[in-house]
Image (cartoon, grey):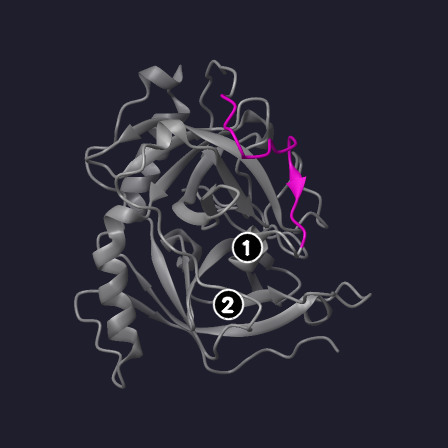
């Protein structure tokens, strides 16, 4: 994996900066689903905003470093790579319905500390690094080979308190939905351009579509075409299937290209991990949070002081 520099206000970390050239094809129209702009700001009234969160370390040398999706009263689903640095003091930012005028994290919303995180027990940074290198040396999309084994870049964060009432846990897409016929939206708090602007960490979305699946490796490739794709700080962010009547979680962003404008991302579909997620949630809600066989990261109890 490659890490970005630690930017103030934090475009701090992401997984898998890959350079892969590809040919784009026109995106299909989907009846009843609006087309997104190249990169579109998400308003608080958008259902995507009710599910998507930013992972931040209030230390100004770190700031926002990943994105995530609410998955229960005290749970956020994100990428395992977001917790490789155990020295961070990670919080989840839940934005206010009406932000205050100031730009500090406490003015933007409610910060709830992550007490601990369970990473997938089979997540291997070395294996993921090797695959990233493979992608970097790849050519056209149809020439990209599948990883030999699942990369399992998935983690579940357990919060010190319940999420605010205006946030809603995401529901999973049904296993039998054909992604080739769906319009998808990727969401996150990461960079919106290259190079990163330190003030970029606002929630945004981009219309994307399924391009290819690697079933044994549990990876999918998504393409935004002319739209901007996943970028620094978007790792762990959700990809939703959105219709006029419903919004469901499809995947978690885990890898992307060096250029935000490239529009290609490599995601972890969530449905194949349903049982793993359920077991992790059950274990962490028990009094002794018995999660034998899971990789648990316990974060320091002491909180750093936030600017008033």
Badge 2: few (under 14), some or many (20 or more) residues near its Cα, within 10 Å? many
| Residue 104 falls inside the magenta stretch | no
For the magenta stretch, what is the residue range?
Answer: 28-43
Residue 258 or 191: which is nearer the viewer?
191
Q: Secondary structure at mark 2?
A: loop
Q: Which residue is mark 2?
A: 90
What is the quadrant of residue 276 in the picture? bottom left
| Marker disc for residue 132 | none
As displayed, is residue 285 above or below residue 254? below
Answer yes or no: is residue 53 visible: no
Residue at 29% over, 75% down: 284
Residue at which label 1 appears: 65
Image quarter in which the N terminus is found: top left
Please tell me whether residue 38 is drawn above or below residue 115 in the rendered image: above
Q: What residue is at 22 percent from the left and 52 percent from the top?
A: 122
Residue 56 % position (x, y) = 57, 62
Q: Is residue 175 left or right of residue 29?
A: left
The percent position of residue 171, horizontal first and vertical second, equals: 39, 55
* Residue furthest bottom as drawn: 287
Cα–Cα gap, marks 1 and 2: 9 Å
**Helix or strand or loop: what does disc 1 sit on?**
strand
Q: Horizontally, is 139 left or right of 42 in the view?
A: left
Answer few, some or many: residues within 10 Å of disc 1's Cα (few below 14, many 20 plus, some between 14 and 19): many
Q: Position of residue 27 (x, y in %)?
A: 51, 21
Q: Please indicate, yes or no, whether residue 168 appears anywhere in the rendered image.
A: yes
Residue appearing at x 74%, y 65% in the figure: 99
């Amino acid at each position: 994996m490659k890490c970005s520099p630690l930017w103030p206000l934090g475009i701090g970390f992401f997984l898998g900066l890959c350079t892969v050239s590809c040919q784009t094809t026109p995106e299909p129209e989907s009846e009843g689903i609006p087309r997104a702009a190249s990169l579109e700001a998400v308003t608080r009234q958008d259902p995507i905003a009710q599910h998507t969160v930013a992972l931040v370390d209030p230390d100004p040398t770190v700031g926002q470093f990943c994105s995530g999706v609410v998955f229960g009263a005290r749970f956020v689903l994100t990428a395992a790579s977001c917790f490789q640095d155990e020295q961070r003091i990670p919080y989840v930012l839940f934005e206010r319905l009406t932000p205050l005028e100031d730009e500090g994290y406490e003015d933007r919303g409610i910060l709830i500390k992550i007490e601990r995180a369970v990473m997938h027990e089979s997540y291997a940074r070395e294996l993921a690094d090797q695959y990233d290198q493979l992608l970097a040396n790849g050519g056209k999309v149809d020439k990209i080979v599948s990883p030999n084994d699942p990369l399992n870049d998935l983690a579940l964060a357990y919060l010190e308190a319940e999420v605010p009432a205006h946030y809603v846990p995401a529901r999973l897409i049904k296993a039998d939905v054909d992604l080739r016929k769906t319009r998808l939206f990727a969401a996150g708090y990461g960079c919106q351009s290259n190079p990163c602007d330190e003030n970029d960490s606002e929630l945004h979305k981009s219309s994307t579509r399924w391009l290819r699946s690697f079933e044994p490796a549990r990876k999918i490739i998504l393409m935004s075409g002319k739209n901007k794709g996943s970028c620094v700080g978007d790792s762990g962010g959700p990809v939703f299937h959105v219709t006029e009547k419903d919004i469901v979680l499809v995947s978690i962003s885990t890898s992307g290209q060096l250029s935000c404008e490239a529009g290609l991302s490599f995601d972890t579909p969530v449905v194949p991990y349903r049982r793993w997620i359920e077991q992790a949630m059950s274990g962490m809600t028990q009094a002794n949070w018995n999660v034998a066989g899971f990789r648990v990261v316990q974060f320091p109890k002491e909180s750093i002081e936030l600017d008033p």
